[in-house]
Image: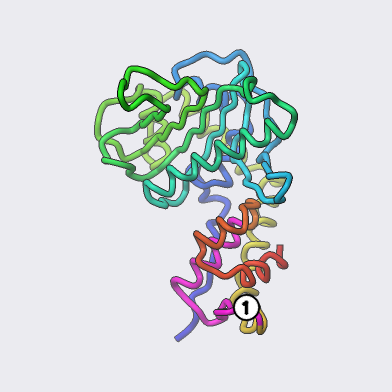
Amino acid sequence: MSEKRFSIKPWEELTIADDYMFKLVMHHPNICKRLIEKILNIKIKHIDYLDDEKSLKFRYAGKGIRLDVYVEGDNTIYDIEMQVRDYGDKELAYRTRYYQSMIDVEALAAGTDYKELKKSYIIFLCPFELFDGLRHMYTFRNICLEDRSMELNDGTTKLFLCSEGKLDDVSADIKAFLDYIKGFPTADEFVTEIDSFIKEIKIKEEERVSYMTYAMKIQEAHDDGRAEGRAEGRAEGRVEGRAEGRDSERIRTAMDMLRDHKPMEEIIKYSHLTEAQIQELAKEL
């Protein structure tokens, strides 16, 4: 029985629901700005990118995360993340908590007084069902349990946009955008602009080459990870070269997270590989 070969999605087949393409699209300032405005029903004068794929690190530990879209507009921080994998409600909730802590720590480490921390929105775009499966949008802020009309006003908001909602609870623009994430055609003007931009990107040779280089590195790391003895003697439960199915998925998860500079503890948690195995895979990046 021949081994099933790992493959990454071809450049021509990428959609906005793919993390790689999402980051390219959100690099267009007008599209990024308009998406934030439509989601939050606000107007923003302008946005500034706080470094592409901003890497935030605890300075005392050297561990960090990489954010998909990290921008500032009108003295407010916006972090927009395309969640390509359904980790479950609880883990996604804890992810927002972790991202919030890293954003705050980065600001404080730069010398900001905690009383001067900017308002922040962490927005997760989820092409799958979340929570009770009813809504397209779930917005969370800290409130008083004894008086739910009273907010803590700590300046933080976590928002989940889900493509699989059932209620008529979002604007026509956002519903069209969520349908587009799912791959459904739509005549919405904003979605048409995004789709046209993606088509323009796909015919640019330099963008295609960049993606192919990325795909090649992932493929090489995956193939090497399947070879026997990758983790050597001190790596318990080494990454087996002949492993299929679950083991292949673990390797792929670890490689994706390594490329995104996720902290070791998080990679271990989601890939279920040992630290030694992950370190061996990291040598190939």
Amino acid found under the numbered disc labelled 1: Ala
**Residue 99 place in picture, x, y as percent:** 55, 40
Quarter location, residue 139: top left
Q: Give the image location of residue 208, x and y in percent.
A: 66, 49
Image position of 225 with respect to 68: above or below: below
* Crowd band around label 1 with a 10 angstrom C-alpha radius: few (<14), some (14–19), many (20+): some
- Quarter of the picture containing the C terminus is bottom right
Q: Is residue 239 magenta?
A: yes
Q: Provide the residue span drawn in magenta.
A: 234-257
Q: Quadrant of residue 100?
A: top right
In which quadrant of the rendered image does the N terminus lie? bottom left
Residue 271 place in picture, x, y as percent? 51, 63
- Residue at far front of view: 146
**For residue 151: magenta?**
no
Viewer-proximal residue among 176 and 142: 142
Q: Is residue 37 above or below residue 275?
A: above
Residue at image position (50%, 80%) is 3
Position of 103 with respect to 271 (left or right) is right
Identify which residue is drawn at 56% across, 22% down: 119
Nearest to the observer: residue 3 or residue 167: 167
Residue sitting at x 70%, y 25%: 112
Q: Nearer the viewer, residue 182 or 121?
A: 121
Q: In this rendering, would 32 be left or right of 178?
A: right
In the picture, residue 264 is in which quadrant?
Answer: bottom right
Q: How is the image coloured?
A: rainbow
Residue for badge 1: 235
How far across and how far down the image is residue 63, in percent?
67, 51
